[in-house]
Amino acid sequence: MKNLFLLTFVLFISGFSFGQDAFSVGPKIGFNSNTLSTNLDSIKSSINNSLQVGAFVRIGSKFYVQPEANYQVVSSSLNLTKGTSIKQQDITIKTIKIPVLLGYKLISQNKFNFRILAGPALSFNIDKKLSPLDMGDLWPLQSANDLKNSTWSVQMGGGIDVFFLTLDVRYEVGIDNLYTGADDVTMKNNIFNVSLGLKIL
């Protein structure tokens, strides 16, 4: 992962040196649809929706680099069905997410662009909540400490720019196991995101 971050940094510098004629920065707001997938056949996860706010910087012309800082509130529900009864635990994680995306403009015009992009993202989980806490001894999550404070993921997708508006559609795949407990249990957050940004520069 360190090598991936180093490669991203080198490409960032390259993008700056080859694309100083193209620079934009601005705020953005987005909609998330996420699910916390597990490898436990007995526990199913439901899809939850949430919002995000943040800011982006884009450097480059045909090829570009786009680092961002976003605040997200992601949530999911884990469900265990036993007979006619269902046990459910709601998970809410407040996150500062920093993706560094590499992109290419398939269509590059003065007032319209069509882009593809992909890159790593680092999430700092600043607040984690479980409700309810008491789910029984066999339930994997017994406290918020069972969830990591930071995780890596990969984002990929596309976008369009029309005048000063920029729209991105992405899918994010969790790389790290979010769960800190038993080695045979894995939990990864996968997110579908649509965001709208405003280029103020």
Image: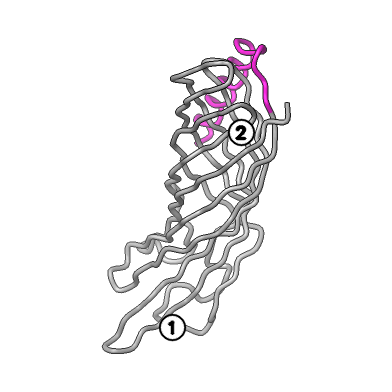
Q: Main secondary structure of the magenta part?
A: helix
- Residue 119, percent from left and from top: 49, 33
- Residue 166, percent from left and from top: 58, 33
* Pointer 2 local density, CA inside 10 Å: few below 14, some 14–19, many at least 20: some
Q: Nearer the viewer, residue 108 or 71?
A: 108
Q: Is residue 67 left or right of residue 106?
A: right
| Residue under label 2 | 165
- Residue 106, percent from left and from top: 44, 20
Q: Nearer the viewer, residue 145 or 68?
A: 68
**Residue extending furthest toward the bottom:** 84
Which numbered disc, 2 or 1, marks the residue closer to the eye?
Answer: 2
Residue under the point 58% across and 55% down: 51
Q: Amino acid at mark 1?
A: Asp
In the image, the segment drawn in magenta is 1-24
Is residue 19 one of those drawn in magenta? yes
User: Regarding mark 2 in the picture, which secondary structure is present there?
Assistant: strand
Q: Which mark is residue 137?
A: 1
Residue under the point 60% across and 10% down: 18
- Residue 42, percent from left and from top: 30, 73
Q: Is residue 56 above or below residue 172?
A: above
Residue under the point 52% across and 69% down: 91
Q: Is residue 17 above or below residue 94?
A: above
Q: Is residue 58 left or right of residue 47?
A: right
Q: Amino acid at mark 2?
A: Leu
Within the image, what quadrant is residue 43 found in?
Answer: bottom left
User: Regarding mark 1 in the picture, which secondary structure is present there?
Assistant: loop
Within the image, what quadrant is residue 45 found in?
Answer: bottom left
* Mark 2 / mark 1, whichever is N-terminal: 1
